[in-house]
Image (tube, helix red, strand yellow):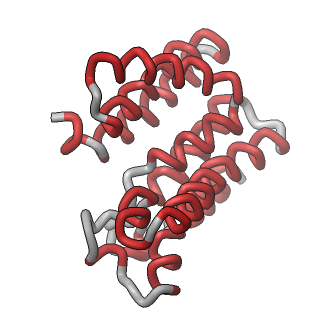
Amino acid sequence: MTLLLFILCYLVGGVLPALYVGRAKGIDIRSQGSGNPGARNAGRMLGEKAFVLVLVLDAAKGALPVLVGKSLGFSPAVVLLLLFAVMLGHCFPILHHFRGGKGAASLLGGIIAFQPLLAVPIILAAVVLYAFIREKTKVSVLAMTVIIPMIAILHGWLAGGIALCLIALLLVTHRSYLL
């Protein structure tokens, strides 16, 4: 059952709201701006309302498997694996030739659904990092790394290891911003 749910979460992750919002306005978001089918590019190409809509939908997409996994009584590690499946589907969707988004909004939505208080250290880390780095994308990605030790402390080494995989995927998809 868990494997089937993992596959289903991957497929859900492959639903890219930015593509549908763009299509509703007659635009293929992957051929505009950065070409990334995510909230930031949707906002640049389609406006603030599109940014907010795509951000909320991508975050909800990350929250959904977490809430389902928690309601089914899965361990924190399995719940985080379901979130990882959604992120894989979002970043490398099979139905879109493995050309997806970067996964930040889906991860943030999933982490808030997993444990809402984890947002506090992420925000604090972002404030501190922004004082030194001053690049929003780099700051937001690096601030997310604080969840690794927090999850390991609160939920054990296995959940912490999966959190490490989540952050590794985020770092890989944002590598051009970090170098």
* Total number of numbered discs in the rendering: 0
147 left or right of 45 in image: right
Above or below for 77 versus 99: above
Between 21 and 163, the one nearer to me in the picture: 21
Question: Residue drawn 45% across and 53% down?
Answer: 88
- Left/right placement of residue 157 relative to residue 73 reads left
Q: Position of residue 176 (x, y in %)?
A: 19, 44
Instruction: Tell me which residue sits at (27%, 68%) in the image.
Output: 35
- Work out whether residue 16 or residue 38 is closer to the camera in this orientation and state it: 38
Residue 16 position, x and y percent, is 49, 68
Residue drawn at x 47%, y 19% is: 146
Left or right relative to 132: residue 49: right
Q: Is residue 10 visible?
A: no
**Residue 18 x %, y %:** 47, 70
What x and y, as percent, mark residue 79?
67, 38
Q: Which residue is farthest left?
A: 179
The answer to whether 113 is drawn above or below residue 26 in the figure is: above
In this rendering, position of residue 103 left or right of residue 177? right
Camera-nearest residue between 87 and 4: 87
Figure quadrant of residue 67: top right
